[in-house]
Amino acid sequence: MLINGMTLRHLRYADALARHGHFGHAARHCAVSQPALSMQIKELEQIVGTPLFERSHRRVEPTEFGHAFVIRARAILSEVAELEHLSRAARDPFSGTLRLGVIPTIAPYLLPAAMDALGRRFPDLQVSVRETVTSRLIEDVRDSRLDVAVLALPVSHPALTAMELLSEQFVLIRPSRDAGRPVPNRRQLREMRLLLLEEGHCFRDQALSFCDLRPADPREVLDASALTTLVQMVAAGMGVTLIPQIAVGIETERADVDVVRFPSPEPTRTIGLVWRSSSPLEGRFREIGDVVRQSAQRALDTSASLT
């Protein structure tokens, strides 16, 4: 209990409601029923003596006071999470649950090998995985909803520490009828029908940067939510795309496409592991990062042999 009957549960529910803007969505996130969450929020508002949220049919928004309250509630929840990590480190840093986040353009190609390697190295460690875009992963690590995340570097958030895992090239995927033709340069790519991931994916921004395109530049384009869709669209003759090297083996195995490397200097990205700089489990995270790095390098080497 905190003050006047206020509990950490109240704070967690208020945080979830502020993030999701919907009682049902917040309740699912907290794994409780909507009436239970609603009752706890109402009880919290009675404790503080003023409304925390404005309700409407479409969305729930924090009041001015509610916004300030939630900011402080998140700081308290983050400190509580650090205390939990400190006690876990004192007992056994490689037991319990590791909450791991991964970006979609690395998850399918890294996780199978990494999860197997982590299970063999740390048999008492349970890994819970969340796959989502970079901005959400950073937010979740910063606010202690995730312990670590695998994403593209650099991450310039002052509260986070990063450990490099691997660097990889982007390759060009084009229809098989183009096999043997010269590899297009950046200017030529800008004139082609370039297929990209939808907005929110950092890989989209990296591809646009390589082609010297701005997000707002008018162009003929089709966006997709997954690399698999992009490759299949290329196989259907709808354009060309870029994918990371680590994805080549899985994504092109059954697709009728031509895979080519760009001439030097090739477009690249760096993948890393990030965690909160204040975490007492940094040593644990670095050991976990070493295992993930080895798995990532093996996956990358296997995929590179196909181009």
Image (cartoon, rainbow, N blue to C red):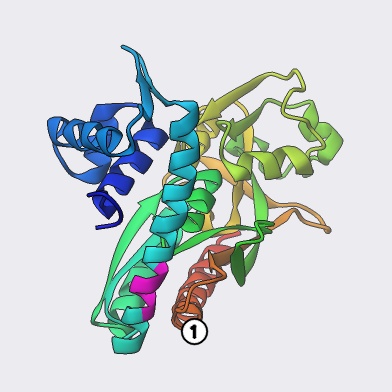
For residue 39, side relative to residue 105 (left or right):
left
Residue located farthest toward the right when viewing the structure as drawn = 187
Location of residue 219 by image quarter? top right
Q: Residues within 10 Å of mark 1 (few under 14, many from 20)?
A: few
Quadrant holding the C terminus = bottom right
Residue 209 drawn at (x, y percent): 77, 41
Please state which amino acid type lies under the numbered disc 1. Answer: Gly
279 or 295, which is in the foreground? 279
> Vertically, is 72 above or below 25?
below
Percent x, y for residue 290? 50, 81
Q: Is residue 77 among what the camera can see? A: yes
Q: Judge from the rendering whether residue 234 lies leftward or rightward of residue 94; answer left or right.
A: right
Point 47% across, 48% down: residue? 72
Where is mark 1, residue-wise? 283
Residue occupying the point 68% across, 25% down: 193
| In this picture, residue 89 sits left or right of residue 291 | left
Closest to the observer, 252 or 54: 54
Report how many numbered discs are placed on residues in the image: 1
Label 1: which secondary element: helix
Quarter of the image containing the N terminus?
Answer: bottom left
Using the rendered view, name the quadrant where residue 58 is placed: top left
Percent position of residue 100, x then y: 39, 62
Asked if the stretch drawn in magenta spans residue 85, the answer is yes
Please report the bounds of the magenta region as a residue range. Answer: 82-86
Q: Is residue 114 magenta?
A: no
Vertical side of 269 occupied by 88: above or below: below
Task: In this rendered view, identify the residue nearer to me: 17 or 218.
Answer: 17
